[in-house]
Amino acid sequence: MGRSTTNVLRFAKIAEDRELGSVMVRLMMACNDLSLANESLGYWRNPRTRKEENRATGALRYFLRLQIAHVCEAMSVIQEIERSSRLRAYVRATDRQTQQSYDALLKIKRNKPFKLMKLIRNKVGFHYDPVWVGGAIKRIDGKYPDLLCTISVGQELLDWHFEPGELVEDSLVVRQIFEIADGADVRVETDKILDDLHKIAATFVDFAGYFIKHHASARR
């Protein structure tokens, strides 16, 4: 990506073409959400207080799940573009790099990393799948029958922390979705997968950002 730039666009121009305008705005919304989720990931990598240190691991996983969920939802817009010959023509009107990013997104939807993202979104992200959670509880209890966990409440929301929920979420993502075996270096194996997931998000933002910029500039 190049240096930061800012352009001015009359909002009425977006409304002139209902189909293209809707796609552009939804891509904008996804980019806005992804940028905030990614920035929050950066924040929690460097906790500033003891209280934040205690919650940093869970916070990192939360904002990662949030970013994944936004990408999964945003990819539905890519499907919508692909189904419309008119919208595909708008993609082909952009520069070569933007088109390549779009083509890469079409391929990504069939790859394992994106399937993992969908599982995280559907089972752990916000839906808290009862069958999967129940299985994880049984698995953890069977392996650690004498496990002790902390449950904390307090005056500030950050003080509210329930370790059993965090243990189950970690088990679902690391063991059931990522399929990292016991005895493996979880950090190393997880980083490999997260790198693939980050590349998907980066490819989406690259396409969406320059697709929007191209057609917004043409409609000022």
Image (spheres, rainbow, N blue to C red):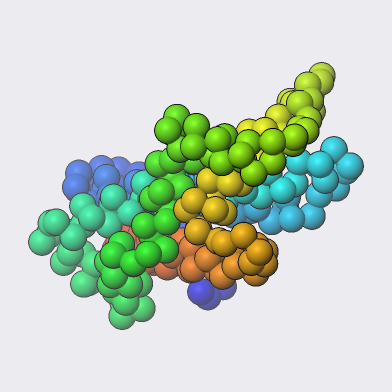
Q: Is residue 5 left or right of residue 220?
A: right
Q: 163 above or below 9?
A: above
Q: Is residue 52 left or right of residue 67?
A: right
Can residue 213 be seen at all in this image of the molecule? no
Q: Residue at x 85, y 38 (%)?
A: 51
- In the image as oriented, which residue stretches furthest toward the right? 50
Q: Residue at x 28, y 65 (%)?
A: 110
Q: Residue at x 56, y 41 (%)?
A: 139
- Residue 153 position, x and y percent, is 78, 21
Quarter of the image for residue 216 reads bottom left
Can residue 184 be seen at all in this image of the molecule? yes
Quarter of the image for residue 4 reads bottom right
Q: Is residue 214 left or right of residue 58?
A: left
Q: Nearer the viewer, residue 180 or 127?
A: 180
Q: 220 above or below 122?
A: below
Q: Is residue 139 left or right of residue 74?
A: right
Q: 68 above or below 195?
A: above
- Residue 177 position, x and y percent, is 47, 53
